């Protein structure tokens, strides 16, 4: 159990002037992050707990999809980027660094070159493929307009995967695998992401989807068929034993495109079924064939020793952006409403009378029992008013709140509140444990 009286949780009552959108305001107010410099943030304990939970779900879903985790460095040599031709192409978004020997280095904005180099140094035969490798690492892009907190940072955490296959057909299978893995990942995070046809930008290639969360504050302009609003990933069997192509076909069967890929004629065709909206890009997948493998001279031996240039794809998820995106999708006037899967703690206990022995003992017993059945507990044992305790608990948005006060205890009950519905019930300690125990 974490005692709030000792926890580093610098909450703020008023909306900070520097924040324009609700997720940024709430992240600052809930003491999750502090700005270090433009677009660069420190993560404080509460924020870091959420970031780690998001990261964990992303990792688990990559692992079940068969991707293998590695860790590449943040700092890369310019040499590799000269080989691919992107050193000049990437422009001012790339942070360039000179080391003490005047060697050109850079802080990686993405890792296609580095992973291709690892591949070229290690794999020799078609028997080594397919491979999907990923890492979760900080990236730096010197964005023209860093804004909205962690949504458009300059330094941000990304999960990026890279697939290697011997031909186009298999490369498409890897693409489908990651597509399905993204549907599963975002659903687990409590989000509704719509895959939309997307531009490939400086990564290059010709097949690409962005996964978009609809939100008024989103920076992407998107167009899609309203039918997508009824697509529910949780209601479908998104498993790898199923026909992945079928799943992808279904999820791309209706019109959905980002503004760069939008076909104006579709507006008339779809009529009132067209949704023209704004959204947050939380993931982006690309198939780009031999773009990097060819430029960097990668070949492996085929079944008849013939040289094969591997087909590649890359697949990104904005891990730190997701923390903001989840808040944009789930909050109210009082604060954040965390989905259970990413909440920094699963329940909060509010002690309304810290100098009452019975209240203290009840709270501590309750915390221990809850932890025994897998809960993570934040215990508000501060010398503060009840009003302040309610406000902070609503602000930090834990799914369950348990309010312990002398009046209820006289009747042997405490109050259980569900943050998302606001539903409150007076229950005995035993019934609370029963209700909050995992059901299986
Ligand atoms: P955007 O269009 O938002 O600038 P991008 O298309 O340049 O993003 P990708 O190269 O596709 O980004 O990166 C993969 C993922 O990383 C994106 O889908 C997004 O979720 C995240 N991401 C990209 N840029 C940033 C940023 N500046 N801050 C936070 N997350 C980012
Ligand atoms: Mg993108």
Image (cartoon, rainbow, N blue to C red):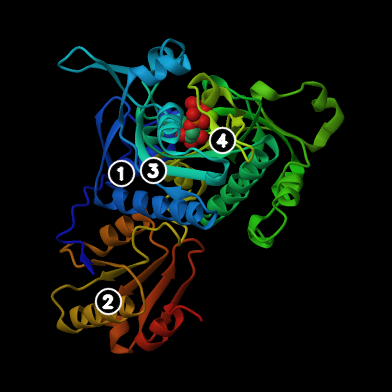
Mark earlier in primary sequence (4, 2):
4
Which residue is at a point 49% across and 69% down the rendered structure image? Answer: 423
Residue 170 left/right relative to 148: right
Please report contact status of discs 4 and 2: CB closer than 8 Å, yes or no.
Answer: no
Gap between marks 3 and 4 measured at Cα = 30 Å
Residue at the spot of label 1:
29
- Above or below residue 235? Residue 44 is above
Please report contact status of discs 1 and 2: CB closer than 8 Å, yes or no.
Answer: no
Q: x, y percentage for residue 342?
A: 42, 56
State the SS at label 1.
helix
Which-is-in-front pick, marks 4 and 1? Answer: 4
Q: Is residue 285 visible?
A: yes
State the SS at label 3.
strand
Residue at the spot of label 2:
367
Residue at the spot of label 4:
301
Please report contact status of discs 4 and 1: CB closer than 8 Å, yes or no.
Answer: no
Residue 240 left/right relative to 42: right
Residue at the spot of label 3:
136
- Above or below residue 235? Residue 321 is above
Which-is-in-front pick, marks 3 and 1? Answer: 3
- Above or below residue 273? Residue 32 is below
Q: x, y percentage for residue 138?
A: 34, 36
Which residue is at a point 19% across and 67% down the rendered structure image? Answer: 381
Mark earlier in primary sequence (3, 1):
1
Gap between marks 2 and 3 measured at Cα = 33 Å
């Amino acid at each position: 159990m974490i005692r709030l009286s000792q926890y580093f949780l610098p909450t703020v009552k008023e909306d900070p002037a520097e924040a324009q959108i609700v997720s940024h305001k709430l992240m600052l107010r809930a003491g999750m992050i502090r700005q270090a410099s433009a677009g660069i943030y420190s993560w404080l304990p509460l924020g870091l707990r959420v970031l780690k939970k998001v990261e964990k779900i992303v990792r688990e879903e990559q692992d079940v999809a068969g991707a293998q985790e590695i860790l590449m460095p943040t700092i890369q040599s310019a040499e590799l980027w000269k080989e691919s031709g992107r050193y000049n192409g990437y422009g001012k978004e790339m942070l360039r660094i000179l080391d003490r020997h005047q060697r050109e280095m850079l802080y990686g904005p993405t890792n296609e070159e580095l992973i291709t180099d690892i591949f070229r140094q290690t794999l020799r035969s078609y028997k080594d493929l397919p491979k999907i490798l990923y890492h979760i690492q900080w990236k730096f892009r010197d964005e023209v307009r860093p804004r909205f907190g962690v949504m458009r940072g300059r330094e941000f955490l990304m999960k990026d995967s890279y697939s290697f296959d011997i031909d186009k057909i298999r490369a498409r299978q890897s693409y489908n695998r990651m597509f399905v893995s993204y549907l599963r990942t975002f659903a687990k995070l409590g989000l509704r992401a719509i895959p939309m046809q997307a531009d490939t930008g400086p990564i290059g290639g010709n097949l690409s989807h962005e996964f978009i969360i609809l939100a008024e504050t989103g920076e992407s302009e998107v167009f899609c068929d309203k039918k997508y609003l009824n697509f529910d990933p949780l209601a479908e069997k998104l498993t790898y034993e199923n026909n992945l192509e079928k799943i992808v076909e279904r999820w791309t069967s209706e019109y959905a495109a980002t503004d760069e890929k939008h076909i104006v004629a579709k507006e008339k065709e779809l009529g009132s079924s067209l949704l023209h909206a704004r959204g947050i890009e939380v993931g982006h997948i690309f198939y780009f064939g031999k773009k990097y493998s060819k430029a960097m001279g990668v070949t492996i031996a085929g079944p008849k020793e013939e040289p094969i240039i591997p087909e590649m794809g890359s697949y990104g998820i904005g891990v730190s952006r997701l923390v903001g995106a989840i808040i944009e999708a789930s909050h109210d006037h009082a604060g954040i409403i965390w989905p259970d899967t990413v909440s920094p703690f699963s329940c909060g206990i509010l002690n309304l009378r810290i100098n009452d022995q019975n209240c203290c003992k009840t709270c501590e017993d309750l915390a221990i029992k809850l932890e025994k059945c897998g809960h993570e507990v934040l215990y508000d044992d501060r010398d503060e008013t009840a009003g302040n305790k309610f406000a902070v608990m609503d602000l930090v948005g834990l799914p369950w709140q348990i309010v312990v006060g002398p009046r209820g205890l006289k009747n042997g009950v405490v109050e259980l509140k569900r943050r998302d519905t606001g539903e409150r019930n007076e229950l005995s300690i035993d019934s609370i444990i029963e209700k909050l125990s995992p059901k299986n």
